[in-house]
């Protein structure tokens, strides 16, 4: 299993990638109990529905990713409802969708507390939520056409094909998630993710990989609900590839 993943490793690149080198920074979404807070306004936040309170039902990563792709949403919001579907397929390289997320656990106390389990390790359920959100953002980037006259696609998580936890993930050390599209079919795609956490004991990059996961997303036409063809992955149309 580890050998198969190594052959498909998508994150080693000799060229600098602006997306990977400028990761989405995650910050805590609630105030630290160690910091002073302003008096509550009885007419504002205390009366909001609990679902609108920041940090209650959305993880910090989910909030950060929604902000990161807000510019894409703004462009798509101008597309009319009767816009035609995408008819001409272009190609995109994996680097166009490659995205990374940085957890600054070492500097953010409340962020650590949001992800800490009773054993001082990361809450895997919360991490899985973040992995799904990142995979969704990556698939959205890949399928976003520069042609704003065509209607956008609906992208849905179809499955988590494989997830391998290679070592414990403590919350007292910074964490990075990397991901990119590795395979594209007619109306589905696979996104591969790596959870990286460096260790002082070793400088080997492969030893930093704490978890790997493969997500499959499917595309649907936003008007008809039927399967929709998606942008082709450059260098290879039908088989899984490895970046060099």
Image (cartoon, grey):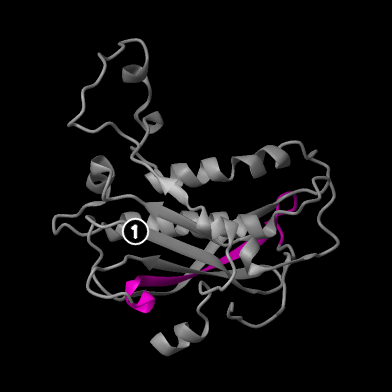
Q: Residue 203's spot in the image, x, y percent?
A: 32, 74
Residue 1 seen in render:
no
Q: Residue at x 51, y 57 (%)?
A: 21
Relative depth, front residue between 24 and 216: 24
205 drawn magenta: yes
The magenta-colored residue range is 204-226
Q: Quadrant of the C terminus?
A: bottom right
Compare residues 205 and 195 and report the one nearer the observer. 205
Image point (64%, 40%), residue name? 71
Residue 89 appears at what percent x and percent y?
81, 65
Occupied quadrant, residue 2: bottom left
Tag 1's secondary structure? strand
Q: Is residue 90 above or below residue 61?
A: below
**Left or right of 168: which side holds 95?**
right
Residue 65 higher or lower than 194, as above or below: above
Residue 153 is situated, as x and y percent measured from the top left of the image, at 69, 53
- Which residue was labeled with disc 1? 175
Left or right: residue 14 compared with residue 63 = right
Q: Residue 53 in magenta?
A: no
Q: Residue at the far left: name it.
A: 119
When asked about the image quadrant of residue 216, the answer is bottom right
The residue under the point 81% across, 54% down is 85
Q: Compared to 60, does 91 lie above or below?
A: below
Please provide percent x and percent y for residue 88. Answer: 85, 62
Residue at the image position 60 percent from the left and 60 percent from the top: 139
Q: Where the N terminus falls, by quadrant? A: bottom left
């Amino acid at each position: 299993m580890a050998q198969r993943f190594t052959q498909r490793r998508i994150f080693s690149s000799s060229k600098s990638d602006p997306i990977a080198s400028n990761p989405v920074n995650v910050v805590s979404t609630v105030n630290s109990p160690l910091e002073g807070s302003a008096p509550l306004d009885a007419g504002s936040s205390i009366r909001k529905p609990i679902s609108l309170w920041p940090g209650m039902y959305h993880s910090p990563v989910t909030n950060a990713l929604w902000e990161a792709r807000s510019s894409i949403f703004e462009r798509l919001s101008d597309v009319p409802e009767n816009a035609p579907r995408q008819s001409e397929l272009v190609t995109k390289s994996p680097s166009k969708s490659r995205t990374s997320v940085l957890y600054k656990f070492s500097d953010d106390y409340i962020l650590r507390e949001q992800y800490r389990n009773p054993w001082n390790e990361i809450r895997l359920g919360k991490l899985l939520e973040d992995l799904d959100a990142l995979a969704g953002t990556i698939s959205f980037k890949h399928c976003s056409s520069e042609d704003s006259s065509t209607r956008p696609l609906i992208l849905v998580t179809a499955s988590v094909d494989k997830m391998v936890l290679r070592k414990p993930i403590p919350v007292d050390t910074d964490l990075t998630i990397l991901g990119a599209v590795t395979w594209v079919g007619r109306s589905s795609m696979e996104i591969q993710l790596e959870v990286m956490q460096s260790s002082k004991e070793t400088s080997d990059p492969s030893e930093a990989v704490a978890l790997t996961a493969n997500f499959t997303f499917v595309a649907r036409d936003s008007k008809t609900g039927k399967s929709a063809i998606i942008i082709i992955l450059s260098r290879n149309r039908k088989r899984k590839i490895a970046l060099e």
